Image (spheres, rainbow, N blue to C red):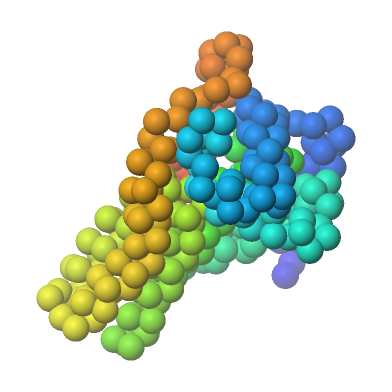
Amino acid sequence: MTLINKKILILPIILIISLIFSYYFGEDSLGAAKHDYFTQVKFIFLFSENFYDTFQGFGYGELLSRNSPVFSIGIAFLTNLGLDLELFRYLNCLIILPLFYFFYKCLEFKFENISYETKIILVSVLLLSPTIRSLIIWPYPLIYALLFFLISIFFYLKFNYCKNEKGKIYYAMLNIFFLAISSYFSPNFALFSIFFFYKFFKYFKLSGNLIIIIFFNILLAFPAIYFAVIKEFYFLKMDVTGVDLNSKLNFTNKIVLISTIIFFYFLPFISIKKKL
């Protein structure tokens, strides 16, 4: 790595250091991340103290939520093992490492002709996103859903570049598995299964491998579908509460937020042929 190459690392380092100040000042550039975090804390304590009753009542009345209970159940389990929630908030910042890694690997696969410096700049964009920054400071299921979704994209790209049939089915299964995990944290990501299935269908056609993929999808989706049905699709009925008018009318924040989400989701599927 040349001296010029090393200098570009200053950018992500500065952005990572900026998170220290974000923790100190409680940055919430997303607008309601802090509120959403403390809503999750409520569920974490309830699952920790009385799992059965909380699970039975989840999705109704005071236990209505836009999210699946997976995140709250997982953290409740860890708190019962002795994890302090404030310590968890600080440990949550480590999620930026796998986010950086898998985003960079996706760039390597998809944009092999662009320079190392450009890839580092694109990876650094993650820490300019209000969503990423806020959810690193205030842990929320979406940040983990994003990570596992990114891993599923990574294996989809591996699927695309793999040359043999055995490798193709292996990476397809990994893509499905990590997309399922992502969807259990945030049901929104389940929609991407339609896109990936279409791609797998185009390659495998009507074959035994496609049947395996269909069965694997059904197997992973069944618990979520069953839970959603018995809970009467509670997450579709939940309004966004606790967000003040100023946050709702913060158009500058929305422009940055929406543009970074579009950029994040569609970057792995576009092509760049010219070397930057």
Q: Is residue 195 left or right of residue 4?
A: left
Residue 115 visible (yes or no)? no
Residue 229 visible (yes or no)? yes
Q: Position of residue 182 (x, y in %)?
A: 48, 56
Q: Position of residue 23 (x, y in %)?
A: 82, 38
Quarter of the image with the N terminus is: bottom right
Q: Position of residue 9 (x, y in %)?
A: 74, 55
Q: Is residue 88 above or below residue 250?
A: below
Q: Is residue 230 above or below residue 104?
A: above
Q: Quadrant of residue 162?
A: bottom left
Q: Is residue 137 left or right of residue 62?
A: right
Q: Residue at x 40, y 44 (%)?
A: 231
Q: Residue furthest left?
A: 206
Q: Position of residue 181 (x, y in %)?
A: 48, 61
Q: Nearer the viewer, residue 268 or 181?
A: 181
Q: Is residue 219 above or below residue 129?
A: below
